[in-house]
Amino acid sequence: MDLTRDFQEFHNEIYDVTQNLALILYNLDTIVEKILAYIDKKDCRKTILQILPGLFRDAQKDIYQAFTDKLLPKLVDILNEKDIEVMGDVFKCLAYGLKYLYDQIKLNFENFYSLYTIRFFSSQNKHIQRFTSESLSYVLRKLKNSEIDGAIKIVMQPLLAEDSDSLLVKHIPKLLFYSIKNHQETYTSKSLNVIECVLRFVLNNQLNDAVYESILNFINEILMHTHKKTAETPQDKFQEKINVTKLNVLEHFVNTFIHWLNNLENIQENAYKLELLSKICVNLVIFRRGIKFSIILSSQ
């Protein structure tokens, strides 16, 4: 129980409007405004952060607009203060926000993705950067196979802009990688579908430096997660049902790329894509031979 004066005042002000779910939903705007007012008071900030996940669980879709318009910016501001004591609580709030508001996030994914990445990918804090990629990957991992292609287009579209932020080249590959990563150097059952959608985006758009570097970084993440010693070890039947074999992912990436490139009418116009494929193939061959490799990330 938080006995600080600030929290006691906060508790007294919201007590009458939080006695049941109907009251909470009816007075949700008032409750959110009280939270925003008192979360700036450091004596009770930690406690208020700890009760926010419960509010997300209770209100769900009814609090989505307040979450994106008011609570998310405030949580970002708190993270930027670099207060170590509450950073974990902020991450927990955001994680539960994505969990309980998932349905609304999926319906508004393009707007949410834009807002979330603008707020977080610009951070220079490596913990915030990693949390951003991992938390957004949670949304991608929950999508149905039929929904993945549209989401991948939204994720990668900012890379096509002439003034594409260099931070996107660093973070988008990590987001894509976390969306297919599984435990113990394995990959999720949707990983091949995600890779096909990524390649489809590459082949259907004019490659620029940002897309080029991002794909190489994505391949680098896959290679670093896949170890030679276990890559070709047969998995038992149960494991085969829940995991995609490791080299399968790399080979599928290359084979899909080759198949689509074979159907291109004008190879000269797609020289950039052929160069990218050649680097992927070289790295895959080096990896399979068990040689210590160095991923080439330069487009020069």
Image (cartoon, rainbow, N blue to C red):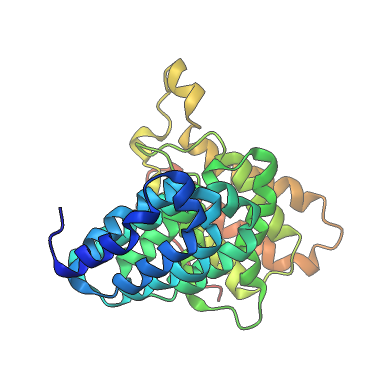
Q: Is residue 286 visible?
A: no
Q: Position of residue 212 (x, y in %)?
A: 60, 67
Q: Quadrant of the C terminus?
A: bottom right
Query: Is 112 drawn above or below residue 240 in the view shown?
Result: below
Q: Residue at x 54, y 65 (%)?
A: 214
Q: Residue at x 78, y 50 (%)?
A: 262
Q: Residue at x 44, y 58 (%)?
A: 133
Query: Is 255 drawn above or below residue 294 in the view shown?
Result: above
Q: Residue at x 56, y 73 (%)?
A: 299
Residue lying furthest bottom in this view?
Answer: 163
Q: How many marks?
A: 0
Residue 236 lies left or right of residue 81; in this view the side is right
Residue lying furthest right in this view?
Answer: 265
Q: Position of residue 276 (x, y in %)?
A: 61, 62
Residue lying furthest top in this view?
Answer: 237
Query: Is 86 drawn above or below residue 178 in the view shown?
Result: below
Of residues 208 and 91, the one nearer the viewer is 91
Query: Is 10 drawn above or below residue 233 in the view shown?
Result: below
Q: Is residue 119 visible?
A: yes
Residue 248 lies left or right of residue 31; in this view the side is right
Q: Position of residue 166 (x, y in %)?
A: 50, 77
Of residues 74 and 171, the one nearer the viewer is 74
Residue 297 lies left or right of residue 47; in this view the side is right
Residue lying furthest left in this view?
Answer: 3
Of residues 19 and 66, the one nearer the viewer is 19
